[in-house]
Amino acid sequence: MDTAMAAVVRESGAFGGLLYVLPPGDDALWLVMVAGVPQEIATPWRRVALTDPMPVADAVRERRLVWIGGQEEMARRYPRPALVLPYHFALSAAPVASSDAVQGGLVLLWPGSHPPQLSHGQRDVIETGCRHLGSLLQQAADSGDPVLPADRPHTLPPPTGRALSPGEAAAVSAFVDRLPGGSCALDLNGRITFVTPAAADLLGADPASLLGALPWEALPWMDVPQVEDRYRAALVSRQPQAFTVLRPPDAWLSFDLYPDSSGISVRITRGSDGAHASPSVPAAGPSRATVLYHLMHLAATLTEAVGVQDVAEQTADQLLPALGAQAMVLMTAEDGRLKIIGYRGYRAEIIDRFDGMPLASDIPGVRVLSTGVPGFFATFADLKRDYPATVHEDGMAAWAFLPLIASGRPIGSVLLAYRRPRPFPPGERAVLTSLAGLVGQALDRARLYDAKHHLAHRLQSALLPHTLPHVPGLKVAARYLPAARGLAIGGDFYDLIRLDAHTAGVAIGDVQGHNVDAAALMGQVRTAVHAHATVSASPDDVLARTNRLLTDLDPGLFTSCVYVHLDLATHHACLATAGHPPPLVRHADGRTELLPVPPGLLLGIEPDTVYSALEFHLPPGSVLALYTDGLVEAPGVDLDDATAALAGLLEHEDPADLDAMADTLIRHAPAPCDDIALLLISPGD
């Protein structure tokens, strides 16, 4: 695996890569191998859900190569990673597959100087490399030793440089010493691997104390966001970077960074005295640049979270790796009891014991929830001192209980647990509390969303028929699929109306919009169609009367509708349509046609609209298919082509099994960005 990964990175001309695996039955990709970039930069994307708006998720889900040619394209197509890594670089993501199945995904990174498009040779290298990696992953699985997610992904060592002879090494050392200013070198993780005496003198530090250290940790005055930010920019873009920083009390130093595949060379010189800034304050806990990095990523992620469970999953995915915690519990109060809405890293039996427990002050999470005051416990002895009844059963050594604040009040709490004792210095406490604040705001929005979602679905389910009536001599199959966006509700409806022993009415329609108003209007339209149909009005008259009612109500939404009157004794049908997709008829011989019905104006526009009716024969063995536009419409898809494809599916299905036919039509529908309603009608002998 190491050899194959190194080969595809090298031969494609990329400077780095990330290899993900998709465990069987999982809905997320897991990072298992990193090449050319430090793990710390890749940490926010250790787990990528297949539904995440990320290049590798799209590549695996759609089984295609995704190419991002630069920073502007990244910001336009994938704003979340663009916000976290606002640097100039190019990226490709491709599915890693064997002959059996998709095994994972491969992300490759190029410098910002890469041409706007991949060359044919690079595409061939990527495709060949992905097939090789997929084959290796499949072989590992077949041998009983599959590649599975670990606590930390495996990191490939950087390529080794040319070995220098003693004479060359002495010449290089002398060359560096002769240059003005000072020089040092950083590895890919940012740690100092080499420093000249002149550089140490400019930095005001002993060379021995610098070696192996991160500059912004060894030198407190360098703990300012721009320092680590320029280091990240150099690593990700592989282009030179520069910055100036104040070494207290008054020495300005200029830094020039020159990156390559093995690390970063740094030139340090005295800067001008023209810049003005105050010296930085030493940080406690994570560096400020690291804090900003994770704050931006968490904020960007939570803006896309909708429901409460989505917030819980995103919080666990982001906070645990970012903060080095091993477990998390998200809690709130509900009817005087503790409600656990999400957790990670704990056994289910522990969570089940606390979930639903009456609120009591001797439960740490409850006290934080009620007071809004965070609690930090560096050891179990500290926790036991404040909560004597606590039993040490989770195997953790340090805990942080953080309030989730929204609109100035606590709405819940989050527990972060660590396997090792942790001192929680003031700076880190502030960081943790800030991050919890973001989660609290997102959770408040998510709870409101879930409440609206629940209310809307209750309204919609109450307005749609729970079951269709049994009509002798008629076989019926109905399907409804909600939209994949918004509240996942809308105004699509269908109905089957038994008029008498030998006649029935069938209706299908679509109210504009995907909200509670659309669902409410859908109920009014369905009721109006039903009422007019039961007084034996003709299809054109049913639509005309319903249209007049809607224009009088003036709901501000328009509705399409088809109404069909069926005479089961004569196998005669008559229909009228108001701006709705025309129905399909599958004849008994398998031939399928689109009914040439005059379209008519949408309901609710013009009160005096006159609708035309079409009469046709519907003998036994034939199938009438009524559907809403969500079944055939999709961005970039020609409507005529999609309708013809639907007719082809209808033609090849067995008319004796309408349920199987309905399932096939729904299964082959485009990704539902709109509601889908489908009604199949087949008369018997």
Image: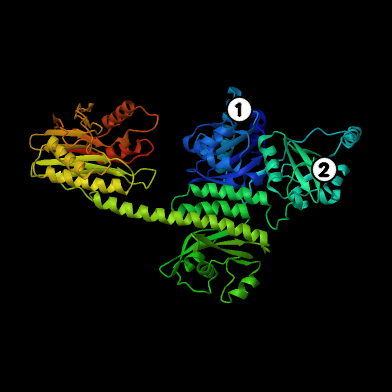
The kind of residue tagged 2 is Phe
Whether 476 is drawn above or below 403: the answer is above
The kind of residue tagged 1 is Val
Residue at 86% in and 33% down: 164
Q: Depth check: give the residue in front, 25 or 318.
A: 318
Q: Secondary structure at mark 2?
A: strand
Q: Secondary structure at mark 1?
A: helix
Circle 1 residue? 125
Q: Quadrant of residue 174?
A: top right
Can residue 36 be seen by looking at this rendering? no
Residue lying farthest bottom?
388
Q: Is residue 544 left or right of residue 122?
A: left
Q: Depth check: give the residue in front, 312 or 197.
A: 197
Circle 2 residue? 194
State the image coordinates of residue 424 (x, y, percent, origin top left): 66, 62
**10 Å crowding of disc 2: few (<14), some (14-19), many (20+):** some
